[in-house]
Image (spheres, rainbow, N blue to C red):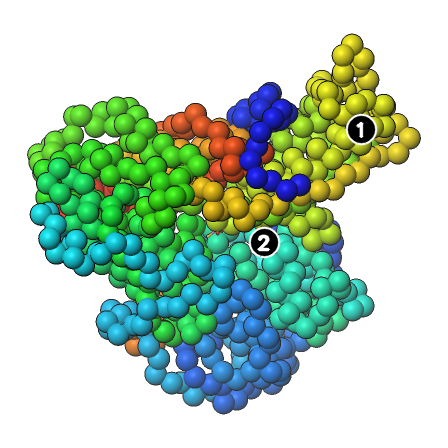
């Protein structure tokens, strides 16, 4: 189905089932331990052997030699695969360092060997017997020293046009020079790790020359294509299955060493192999959110109107890696005639930097939204008002493009009202609660909404059951549930009569889970397939498809009513279709999502410990398909934002080039006790340009802006402005 704008009668608009706070369908399986993860598929391969990965002990250099003799002779060992056994495996489209093969080491903990043994313990013990002789080369590991000379990055491909590294509008320098009120400040964000619950894991089984992998991956079609390329196996001999995923956050957008080495190990062992990246390998072996150094320059009139907006960001990455697109929101969030953004990248020898929840906007807003707070203070204006005064309803770089929907002002006004913002002291350091200094902070949230092609297959059987198949994944976000709601609404059957099957490359290719595009696009694909099924049903039952209503398990037109089951009494009806968006859509309007984030903190006046006391998010994000699962996404994002503000940082060993705190004991993330009252409000909104669902992304919006709201609240509490995240207590003194 080609989509331009949703007009005319649309069964989704009834909102009998879509838009309801349905419980997660997979919730009971996940919470009772009965949702099998990749590493737990004993049913499929009871004879699976265990793999154990050895990661490189250097960040850069070569392997002179590897002695695997003792490992091969160790108890239980079935096979050992060394990186020296083969040439570097081809790089896929999405990987920026080699996952395996060859003597060259590109980053710390890059996979260099795999041991396959009868038990996990035997594999681990044998891996520790491998002796590797490295020739270490000194690498570049310190962003602060590399940043000054990092060149502007270049946009390498058309799909990165949005991420054009330098954008200009008007005359920034001149406008900034003569602005009556100015701010010029530098902010830093650290490297961060996804820290998802389930580490990357795969069970691989060869059946002749056919390979099936049960893995933990957000993007099935990408995984299949990338695995085919990496292993040089034709795509039609591969099957990728990932029905349950214990968190992704971007870490599982792309295939990683677990899937490649499980496949190689299974081949070498002549039996299925399962392999999980041991937790201490995840941070350095896989991807992370790269650190940034950002400079923001704001020029404004005395009444608070921005006349100049400049945002430069520099981040590091491996030679084939991209810069963190931390200027993305600055192009679109506020009005202002004179604008400049630039992205620079320093080539570094740290592990692969790549997407982590709201890549670009999440770290970009950490800087921009402190800057707006600082500007408000210089102006003597309320920080909510400064943002409202600078609202824009059009793309400020291309004013002919309006936003499809944009209720940022309403988010801020409602949020301020609800949060009791009027009680905030404009002067910092004034409010005490016992030994705690108390403050409030605000930030705007912004995240783009992306349109992605997505397909599905639906089947109606003689029992009136509708089965949906799509390669969409559910990374804990609620995909199963909103897809079931969509199919039930479209076909007029009960939710209990919908079966949703996800995460299998044998199913039609969906949008997958990433960039908060999964919810809107995957359901739109299901919508398209259901439209086709409705036509088939109507035709089979002799209805004129134009006037037919599907409800209560029945098909009706005029006073004729037939059970849906009758349409499939002799044979199931199967329909397959997808949603496709024209390029015109992009030109017509800018689709983004907005939030107002409000935070109250207490900072202990003796110790400097920060405790979040209250959080509120008001979101403008199109139609909310399921307010319960959407709220879960947003509060999860807020927790992650609290982590970014106060705790999360991969500590770089600048001599040897690795992340030191590479486990969950030392990489700090918030726990329940850190998170107090959280409230989420969704503004009433439908976006007819986004899809027939009229929804938008919301899963990443939740994190965007939160850390800055925390930082601003800390400033309001203490009068100490910290511009380097995370805001740990040592930075107050
Ligand atoms: Mo998201 S970082 O695109 O999974």
Q: Secondary structure at mark 1?
A: helix
- 107 above or below 217? below
Residue position for label 1: 537
Q: Residue at x 26, y 74 (%)?
A: 149
Would you identify the image quadrant in which residue 237 lies? bottom right
Cβ(mark 2) to ligand 1 < 8 Å?
A: no
Of labels 2 and 1, earlier in sequence is: 2
Query: Depth check: 547 or 596 in front?
Result: 547
Q: In this view of the protein, can residue 377 be seen by the observer?
A: no
Residue visible at 49% across and 46% down? 586
With respect to residue 543, does 210 lie above or below? below
Report the side of 499 relative to 398 (left or right): right
Rounded to the nearest whole Å, what is the CA distance between mark 2 and mark 1? 32 Å
- Left-right relation of 466 to 320: right
Q: Nearer the viewer, residue 640 or 230?
A: 230
Looking at the rendered image, the quarter that the N terminus falls into is top right
Horizontal and vertical percent position of residue 520:
54, 39
Task: Point out the residue furthest to the front here.
Answer: 400
Which of labels 2 and 1 is toward the front? 1
Residue denoted by label 2: 219
Q: Residue at (28%, 24%) from the top-left corner?
A: 418
Picture quarter containing residue 536? Answer: top right
**Mark 2 nearby-residue class (10 Å; few <14, some 14–19, many ≥20):** many
Residue 159 — which label?
none
Question: Mark 2: which secondary structure?
Answer: loop
Does any portion of residue 394 appear in the rendered image? yes
Outermost residue, top direction? Answer: 559
Disc 1 packing (10 Å; few <14; some 14–19; many ≥20):
many
Residue 80 in the image: above or below residue 633:
below
């Amino acid at each position: 189905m080609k989509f331009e704008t949703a007009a005319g009668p649309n069964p989704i608009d009834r909102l009998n089932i879509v838009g309801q706070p349905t419980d997660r369908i997979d919730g009971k399986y996940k919470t009772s331990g009965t949702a099998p993860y990749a590493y737990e598929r004993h049913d499929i391969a009871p004879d699976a052997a265990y793999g154990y990965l050895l990661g490189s002990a250097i960040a850069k250099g070569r392997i002179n030699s590897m002695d695997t003799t003792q490992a091969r002779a160790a108890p239980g060992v079935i096979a050992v695969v060394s990186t020296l056994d083969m040439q570097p495996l081809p790089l896929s489209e999405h990987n920026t360092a080699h996952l395996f093969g060859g003597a060259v080491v590109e980053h710390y903990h890059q996979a260099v060997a795999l041991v396959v043994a009868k038990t996990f313990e035997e594999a681990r013990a044998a891996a520790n017997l491998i002796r590797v002789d490295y020739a270490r080369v000194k690498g570049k590991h310190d962003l602060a020293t590399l940043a000054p000379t990092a060149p502007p990055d270049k946009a390498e491909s058309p799909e990165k046009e949005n991420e054009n590294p330098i954008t200009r509008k008007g005359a920034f320098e001149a406008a900034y020079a003569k602005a009556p009120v100015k701010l010029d400040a530098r902010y830093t964000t650290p490297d961060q790790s996804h820290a998802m619950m389930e580490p990357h894991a795969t069970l691989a089984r060869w059946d002749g020359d056919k390979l099936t992998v049960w893995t933990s991956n957000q993007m099935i079609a990408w995984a299949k294509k990338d695995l085919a390329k990496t292993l040089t196996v034709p795509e039609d001999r591969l099957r990728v299955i990932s029905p349950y995923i214990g968190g992704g956050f971007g870490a599982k957008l792309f295939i990683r060493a677990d899937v490649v080495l499980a496949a190689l190990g299974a081949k070498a062992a002549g039996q299925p192999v399962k392999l999980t990246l041991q937790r201490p390998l995840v941070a350095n072996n896989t991807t992370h959110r790269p650190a940034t150094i950002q400079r923001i320059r704001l020029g404004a009139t005395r009444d608070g109107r921005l006349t100049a907006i400049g945002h430069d960001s520099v981040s590091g990455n491996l030679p084939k890696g991209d810069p963190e697109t931390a200027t993305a929101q600055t192009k679109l969030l506020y009005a202002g005639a004179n604008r400049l953004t630039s992205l620079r990248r320093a080539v570094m020898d740290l592990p692969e930097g790549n997407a982590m929840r709201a890549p670009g906007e999440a770290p970009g807003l950490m800087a921009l939204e402190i800057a707006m707070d600082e500007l408000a203070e210089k102006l003597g204006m309320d920080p909510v008002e400064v943002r409202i005064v600078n609202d824009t309803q059009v793309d400020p770089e291309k004013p002919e493009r309006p936003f499809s929907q944009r209720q940022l002002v309403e988010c801020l006004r409602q949020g301020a009202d609800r949060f009791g913002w009027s009680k905030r002291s404009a002067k910092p350091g004034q409010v005490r609660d016992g030994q705690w200094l108390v403050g409030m902070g605000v930030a705007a949230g912004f995240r783009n909404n992306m349109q992605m092609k997505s397909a599905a297959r639906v089947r109606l059987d003689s029992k009136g059951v509708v089965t949906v198949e799509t390669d969409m994944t559910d990374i804990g976000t609620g995909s199963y549930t909103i897809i079931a709601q969509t199919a039930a609404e479209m076909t007029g059957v009960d939710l209990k009569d919908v079966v949703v099957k996800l995460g299998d490359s044998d199913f039609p290719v969906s949008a997958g889970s990433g960039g908060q595009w999964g919810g809107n696009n995957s359901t739109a694909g299901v919508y398209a397939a259901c439209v086709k099924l409705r036509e088939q049903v109507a035709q089979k039952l002799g209805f004129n498809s134009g006037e037919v209503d599907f409800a209560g398990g029945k098909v009706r037109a005029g006073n004729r009513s037939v059970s849906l089951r009758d349409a499939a009494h002799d044979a199931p009806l199967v329909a397959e279709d997808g949603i496709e968006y024209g390029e015109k859509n992009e030109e017509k309007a800018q689709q983004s999502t907005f939030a107002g984030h409000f935070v109250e903190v207490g900072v202990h006046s003796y110790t400097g410990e920060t405790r979040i006391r209250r959080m509120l998010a008001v979101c403008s994000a199109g139609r909310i398909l399921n307010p319960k699962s959407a709220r879960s996404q947003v509060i999860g994002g807020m927790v992650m934002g609290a982590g970014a503000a106060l705790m999360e940082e991969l500590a770089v060993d600048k001599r040897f080039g690795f992340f030191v705190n590479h486990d969950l004991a030392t990489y700090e993330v918030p726990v329940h006790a850190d998170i107090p009252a959280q409230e989420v409000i969704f503004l009433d909104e439908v976006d007819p340009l986004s899809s027939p669902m009229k929804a938008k992304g919301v899963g990443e919006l939740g994190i965007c802006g939160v850390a800055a709201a925390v930082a601003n609240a800390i400033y309001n509490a203490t009068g100490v402005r910290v511009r380097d995240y995370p805001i740990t207590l040592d930075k107050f003194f």
